[in-house]
Amino acid sequence: MVKQVVTTICFVLFHCIISYWAFMSSCSVHSTATTIPAIARYFGTKGRYEEVNPYLIDDILDIKKSLVKLPSLKCYAIHLTAVIRHGTRFPTTKNILKMRKFYDLVVRYASGNLNCLWEIKSNWKMWYRDEMDGRLVDKGREDHKHLAQRLIRWFPSLLTKENLRRGRVKLITSSKHRCVNSTIAFRAGLMEGLNIQVELEHAVNDTLMRYFDQCERFVKEVENNKSALEEVKYFNEGPEMKRTMEKMADRLEVPYANITDDSVEAAFYLCAYEFTIKGLNSPWCQLFDKVDAEVMEYSGDLKQYWKRSYGHEINSKSSCILFHDLFHRLDRVVAQINSDGVVSEVVTVQVGHAETLIPLLTLLDLFKDDIPLNSTNFATQQNRIFRSGHIVPYAANLLVVLYQCPDGIRMGVRINEKPLTLPGLSDSVPLYEDVKKHYSALLGGCDQETVCKIKNS
Ligand SMILES: *[C@@H]1O[C@H](CO)[C@@H](O)[C@H](O)[C@H]1NC(C)=O
Ligand SMILES: *[C@@H]1O[C@H](CO)[C@@H](O)[C@H](O)[C@H]1NC(C)=O
Ligand SMILES: *[C@@H]1O[C@H](CO)[C@@H](O)[C@H](O)[C@H]1NC(C)=O
Ligand SMILES: *[C@@H]1O[C@H](CO)[C@@H](O)[C@H](O)[C@H]1NC(C)=O
Ligand SMILES: *[C@@H]1O[C@H](CO)[C@@H](O)[C@H](O)[C@H]1NC(C)=O
């Protein structure tokens, strides 16, 4: 009798353990604990800001003051310009279509016996609708609200009630709804963080924040020119991408012919969007291993490189207007400090796109690899510095700070709240006049109209 009970208990226990193990190892969509997909750091421009600064996962308002080293304790901040990408958003309609097509293929034809396929077929619903088209999601509002509140902590003497009341804080945005709504969320974050309510209108300025649309030469030579992006095309037709597609087809047990580079891209997006929007480590993520994710990341980085960065000179030159706008403002601040000491524009926040930030960072010579990224050097570019996931995740930001120091006015630059030294300058917080000397060719030229004019041949 006793023996029988023990046997039964053992049997039940064994089954519990087995089913628990099976549950844990499946890719459950109902898992409540948010686990981070193993491939989350490869999402590129579809990546989460927290992947760049993982300490934010524990405390979203944390700042790492110890990273900032000023030349003297007597330096204090006098101005901040922040150029910020919009927050987390829905996929665009074009990508929603690709995702739906891939989802339909999986539901109808996939016959592999991976747990995650079963999860997708029985539990996952295609909930993305065309009208979501690139709109800001709740997480995107939070991205900007929290960034505003961290900036209050970073710059307590600049983001003050007084400066807000006196209109010394300016907000400028691109006209795209996701940027306008990011700006509104940023402002709400400021008001909440400083515990005040004041009028603070934002200005919409596409000439400045969407300069790439207005640069005729860029539009003709790159945007509307298929051969400008041929390295991306060659890579997507090349051996690494082919292998990724074949592995995907093997996992789904569908013919190789049914999986295109669009299908693997759609699967990758499904994994990325489910995570950034809903915080889910969804079954879609199980369709990729680390190497596949690296290939997808490289394909995305190649596109940014050739369309927005070092690939073509006009890419960075199209941002001349934003470059001059920045230095005009900094000059004005310096002139005011040197006259009556009253700065009229203490903080300027400019909200735009990844496409707004990358060309400007490129113009400043940042994140430049010695060897260009191309269709055949995926393997040797493993340690490249041009990684869009590190540079422009959602809510990515370029912070330019002027300091009054005992020996003059100095300038600090941070990307995503991490200080960096401008290439060609030895000092991490150089004198402002040395920065100007370094960029003198651009400051004296880089005229938007001239640069963007189409050359008649
Ligand atoms: C912007 O936010 C407002 C209110 O928060 C919302 O009603 C509107 O739909 C949002 N627009 C977009 C494009 O997300
Ligand atoms: C398109 O891009 C290629 C490669 O950069 C370039 O040689 C060509 O002149 C461009 N075409 C136009 C119309 O600008
Ligand atoms: C899958 O490939 C087969 C040929 O191998 C083709 O007949 C079929 O239409 C394809 N189906 C889809 C959904 O692409
Ligand atoms: C947009 O910004 C540019 C550059 O600072 C400026 O010249 C222009 O007047 C602004 N446009 C509007 C509508 O404010
Ligand atoms: C890509 O770059 C490598 C250097 O890393 C070079 O050897 C190779 O020829 C380039 N490939 C193409 C297609 O330009």
Image (cartoon, rainbow, N blue to C red):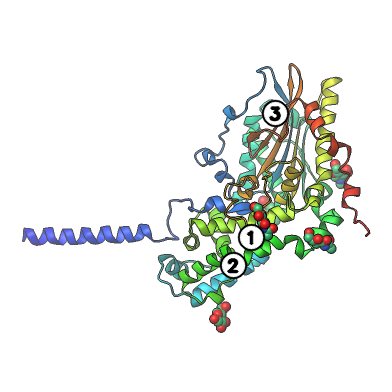
User: Within 10 angstroms of label 2, few (less than 14), some, or many (20 or more) residues?
Assistant: many
The amino acid type found where label 1 is placed reads: Pro
Q: Residue at x 83, y 44 (%)?
A: 320
- Is residue 309 rendered to the left or right of residue 89? right
Structural distance between the alpha carbons of marks 3 and 1 = 41 Å
Q: Earlier in the sequence, mark 2 or mark 1?
A: 1
* Residue behind mark 3: 426
Q: Earlier in the sequence, mark 2 or mark 3?
A: 2
- Residue 90: image location, x then y, percent: 63, 58
Q: Residue at x 75, y 47 (%)?
A: 359
- Residue 137: image location, x then y, percent: 62, 54
Q: Residue at x 72, y 55 (%)?
A: 306
Front one among 35 and 240:
240
* Residue behind mark 1: 91
The amino acid type found where label 3 is placed reads: Ser
Front one among 389 and 186:
389
Q: Which mark is residue 99?
A: 2
Q: Do residues under tags 2 and 1 come within 8 Å of each other at their CB atoms?
A: yes
- Residue 104: image location, x then y, percent: 55, 74
Q: Which mark is residue 362?
A: none
| Above or below, 157 relative to 253 | above
| Above or below, 370 relative to 237 | above
Confirm whether residue 335 shows in the render: yes
Quarter of the displayed picture in which ligand 3 can be seen: bottom right
- Residue 236: image location, x then y, percent: 63, 64
Question: Between tags 3 and 1, which lies in front?
Answer: 3
- Is residue 178 rendered to the left or right of residue 263? right
- Is residue 239 rendered to the left or right of residue 441? left
- Mark 2 lies within 8 Å of ligand 3 (Cβ measured): no
Structural distance between the alpha carbons of marks 2 and 3 = 47 Å
